[in-house]
Image (tube, grey):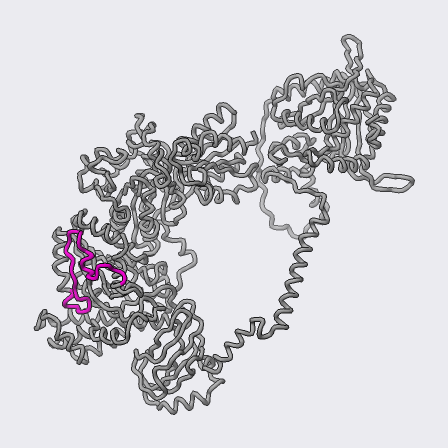
Amino acid sequence: MPEIQFRQALRAAMTEEMERDDSVFLMGEEVAQYNGAYKVSEGMLKRFGPRRVIDTPISEAGFSGLGVGAAMAGLRPIIEFMSWSFTLVCLDQLVNNAANIHYMSGGQIKCPIVFRGGNGIAHQLAATHSHRVESIYARIPGLVVVCPSTPYDAKGLLKTSIRSDDPVIFLESEIILSDRGEVPDEEFTLPIGKAHVERPGAEVTVISYGKSMARFTRPAVARLVEEDGIDVELIDLRTLRPLDTLTLIESIRKTNRCVIVSEDYGYCGMGDAIQARLHKEVFDDLDAPIEVVHSDEIPIPFNHHLEEATMPSVERVIQAVKEVTYR
Amino acid sequence: MPVEITMPQLSDTMTEGTVVKWLKKEGDKVKGGDIIAEVETDKATMEMESFEGGTLAVLAVAEGGKVSVGGTIAVLATGKESAEEVKKNYKSTGGSAPEPVASSATSAKQVAPIKKAQSPSTSPVVEVKSESQSGTVAAAASSAEHQSPGSGSSEVHRIKISPLARRIARSKGIDLARLEGSGPGGRIVQADVLAFARLLPSAGAAAPAAEGGAPASQPAAITAPDLPERLASGKTEVIELSKMRQTIALRLQLSKQQLPHFYETVDVDVQGLSELRQTINQKLEKQNIRLSISDFVNKAIAAALRQHPAVNAHFDSQKNQITRFGDVHLGIAVSLPDGLIVPVLRNIDQMGLSEIRQRSVDLAQRARAQRLKREELSGATFTVSTLGMYGIRDFSAIINPPEVGILAVGAAEPRAVVRDGQVVARTMMSLTLSVDHRAVDGAGAAQFLQTLKQMLEEPALMLV
Amino acid sequence: MAVADEVAKRPSIRKTPRSDGSVELGYLRMMMLIRRFEERTYREYTKPGQKIGGFCHLYSGQEAIAVGIAARFDKKRDYLINGYRCHGHSLALGMSPRAAMAELFGKATGCSKGKGGSMHFFSAENRNMGGHGIVGGHIPLALGLAFSQTYRETGGVTYCLFGDGAINQGTFSETLNLASLYKAPCLFIVENNGVAMGTQVERSSAEKDLALRGSGFNMPHFHVDGNDLDQFMEGIADAIKRARTGGGPSFIVANTYRFRGHSMSDAMKYRTREEMEQAKLRDPISLYEVSLRDIGLLTDQQAEALEEEVSAEVEQAIQQADADPQPTMESRFEDALAETYPLEK
């Protein structure tokens, strides 16, 4: 299997779907002539022309709403945000319009749209550009929230997202766009709403997603298994809403211990929300409280060292796993 | 037909309205859509229109009067009837008229004070008194509720245990009070319960018997109850012997085959010791040390062995030698998930109680974590095995050669005993000594037990 | 007759009937139906017992705009999208009074299955893409609908309606700029009734001439009479043609007057009685009735008959809606998502 970058996997998914279905188009700031702020859409203007790869002015509310309207009319827009932090100026379009149209119209009007872009803490962009929006969107009924951690997952999940008749919040990360991984050339898709048990284990369930999975959790688990001999079951959520609670519950009932790793804040954050979902179901199976590894509860600082210290880390994950396994 | 104009609902929250001003008077002709009055709601003063045309026959409420939503404010004569006629009829039916008329101006005025009656100012005595009384009763009840469990069982401190450990303990019928927690803050975790469960003799057979014992004595039911069918849910497991299991099998079989065991049991009154333990523990609370009965027993064993070196010995059949030791190195049996291990408290005879406590907890924890050093597992001169925490009254242990004795310690429990010709309840404990007859005879063993009993019943003797 | 004076003032559009009058009488009937529906809604809302809950914004006085758009609406390819004052347009585009009233009652037979209410009437069948509750929130959606018409080269037009309050939202400026850049076939129509809830245009817009708020986007921007059906239809004709032929969007201020409060609990203290009396002289229904009489398309008897017809139709709708079933408790979980998950496609 060829090894490609995360951004190439995203591009491959969009390209394949646009070739497959004329109703799919890509729109966003700098996606066309500039070839993408992060080069995800590089070459797509040349391939598909200005009808289907469309630059926008800096008007997030305007063009995200445009996408919703086009989706209501039956097109399948892919709206790229340069950063999910910028969607704070167009929340109404996503939360009120995209999420509610199908319900409020009594099921008459669908909204098949994908909003995608970089989420979370990149590198030294400071507080305004470092928001982790997953808990903002994953709490909204009517939205689907997907967050891949590998090139393979990115391609398979983005293809399914484009084909879904629901509005999908697709969360990427600038930090892992250059990550490489094996992705088959042939057609494949991955299911939305299904978590992936990446490593089966017996002693502790470790749950993560997206960049937190790629940068903190996966390396930490590798060390825990090799150096400490802890038999970790590692689960990549892939989809944050709808949450695959069944897989998580089944795992924790087996391992009796659980750590959730998320770059989001703790209070009202993604990790706490998942934990709350699980606690009642697995209460009698727990040998230790569920541990959530999250970012410190402060605006994200600019200084490199302060920023590093604010985020979860391999060490924090290892410490949390040892805590719940009483090592 | 006359038409009643009723108080409209002008907002979600509106329950009544006030007619602020009449813009028409009785006898005026009105068209549909004409404004007839101004009505004040909870939100604003609004104009009120007549939906129908006709002649205003009755203004049922004076300006300033309140009318609840749906109540009549005016009556309109429409069609052929005359306004005077309508007004006359309206007045004659007055109070006893069907529901809409009941909310006319007069009744509306009555409504208002009734509502106010709920506030203390209108009927202060009754309302306030009953409120304060019920308040006091409630407070007393709740404080009693809070006190009763607290005062009744003030000595029972809350057991910290993980939900999983609690569930396993419950399923195995293990008393939580007998468990010791190795987790943070003394939390009992899965590993602790499993370790104790492994020590339970034929735990598998005992637990179901305890749980399912009752139905046998029940009279047979007349009709077969509709019970769910039992499906086989357990699966049979074949387990390869671990190294540890093989060692246990080999050594204990050898011991039981080659050593001529005999057994002596003594019952010890440990009531005083229990009380002493509590007193000491209160003093030690600040140091975060909690002595167990076992710590006292171990201390007493060490002291008694010093007085009876015949039991504190090794037997060597090759050399035809017995070695009696001047120091006491006490082996303490610790259960593990897959067997047991006997770490050694070296020179226990030179230790105080708190040191014994700290060292034995440390050894037990490291034993369970399989982090004992080789020298910590050898060189015992005598061994003690305790199953009291499982409620075992007494049992006989197998000697660990070349040692010549092992003491089996049962539970400290209240029993009926005879004191001065009276049956009284005392906290008692049974100790059973297994002895290798090649090294020690019955009387020698008995003397050791006697000393041990004295020391436990009068702990001060340990100091001698 | 004062209304006749008002009619006489207007520019001459036509003096002789173009048809047998059935089309014109249809327009009149629809305006009457909307008015009757709204006035009965007012009564149902204010009746004790709370059959209609929540916010409710009535359209009385602005009927010419909805009916004028519906008259020009191509049911195969056009779209209409609206703010929260959406009863009138929905009826004009063909929604049955029963589906509309049932929605107000929250019934299962309502146009949005009782999940939208007064502010959220939808009819995919009529290409009515909704009433939308957040002021200005739907303006970008109109652009998306228009974008799809360009993308698919349908020649369709999107009518985007909003009030004078919405032009002060950021989405208005963002959307007009984008629409002009992309040459979206969209008519942005402000129904200027002069008050954003209780704030007069003079207090909410720095530029008093609202049409000028559409300048700076390189698109036509102009006023039309929103009370005179003939003038309104005439006034938007060029903009429609321009949109259908790839010329892009227009910004139109349709000046009108709201006879009712902003919503049900509005006492309208911001208006004087004189102002309201004056406005009633330009009631769109009266104006149109008089102009039809002038060219011999309408008799008094016909007008009365139409009144009775629409009155009966609305009464029947209320009775049906009243008898219609409440949505089932389980139905509240339906339609949150279009797909079932896990989704493998």
Q: Nearer the viewer, residue C319 or B450?
A: B450
**Residue A226 placement (x, y as % from top left):** 48, 23
Residue shown at 49%/85% (left/top)? B96
Q: Nearer the viewer, residue A150 or B260?
A: A150
Q: Nearer the viewer, residue C83 or B281?
A: B281
Q: Give the magenta range.
A: C203-232
Is residue A33 rendered to the left or right of residue A219? left
Residue shown at 27%/65% (left/top)? C200
Residue lying furthest right in this view? B421
Residue shown at 33%/44% (left/top)? A168
Q: Is residue B133 above or below residue A278?
A: below
- Residue C208 lies in the magenta-colored region: yes
Quadrant location of the C terminus of chain A? top right
**Residue B444 placement (x, y as % from top left):** 86, 20
| Residue C219 in view here | yes
Is residue B390 rendered to the left or right of residue C35? right
**Residue A242 placement (x, y as % from top left):** 40, 44
The quarter of the picture where residue A239 lies is: top left
The quarter of the picture where residue C1 lies is: bottom left
- Residue A60 lies in the magenta-colored region: no
Q: Nearer the viewer, residue C169 or A251?
A: C169
The quarter of the picture where residue A123 lies is: top left
| Residue B398 in view here | no
Quadrant location of the N terminus of chain A? top left
**Residue B340 placement (x, y as % from top left):** 66, 25
Is residue A96 rendered to the left or right of residue B327? left
How many discs appear?
A: 0
